[in-house]
Image (cartoon, helix red, strand yellow):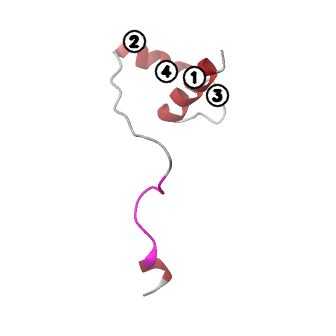
Amino acid sequence: MSEIEKRKVGRPAVNATPITLRLPPELLAWVDTERAKQTPEPTRPEFIRQVLEERRGD
């Protein structure tokens, strides 16, 4: 079996639980506006993780 055949497809395993999150349009617009201010612009999930980490630090 070649090295390519041994590799698993998809994202690597991490010690995290995926969640589904629904946001009202005005909150999603705020998320997109705020993350667009960062360089490089983070993905929506990464931005939400950043906000939660900052809040957890309080």
- The reply to whether the magenta stretch includes residue 16 is no
Disc 1 designates what residue?
51
Q: Quadrant of the N terminus?
A: bottom left
Report the amino acid beneath label 1: Val
Q: Which residue is mark 3?
A: 38
Residue at the location (48% across, 31% down)? 44
Q: Give the CA distance from mark 4 to mark 2.
A: 9 Å
Q: What residue is shown with label 4?
A: 31
Position of 42 compared to 4: left or right? right
> Which residue is painted at 39% across and 12% down in the image?
26
Q: Nearer the viewer, mark 2 or mark 1?
A: 1
Q: Could you tell me the amino acid type at mark 4?
A: Val
Mark closest to the chain's N terminus, 1 or 3:
3
Number of callouts: 4
Marks 3 and 2, how far apart at CA: 19 Å
Which portion, as a residue range, is magenta? 6-13
Helix, strand or loop at label 2? It is helix
Which x, y percent locates residue 35? 56, 25
The numbered mark, 2 or 1, whose residue comes first in the sequence reads 2
Q: Mark 4 vs mark 2: which is more N-terminal?
A: 2
Q: Is residue 22 left or right of residue 44?
A: left
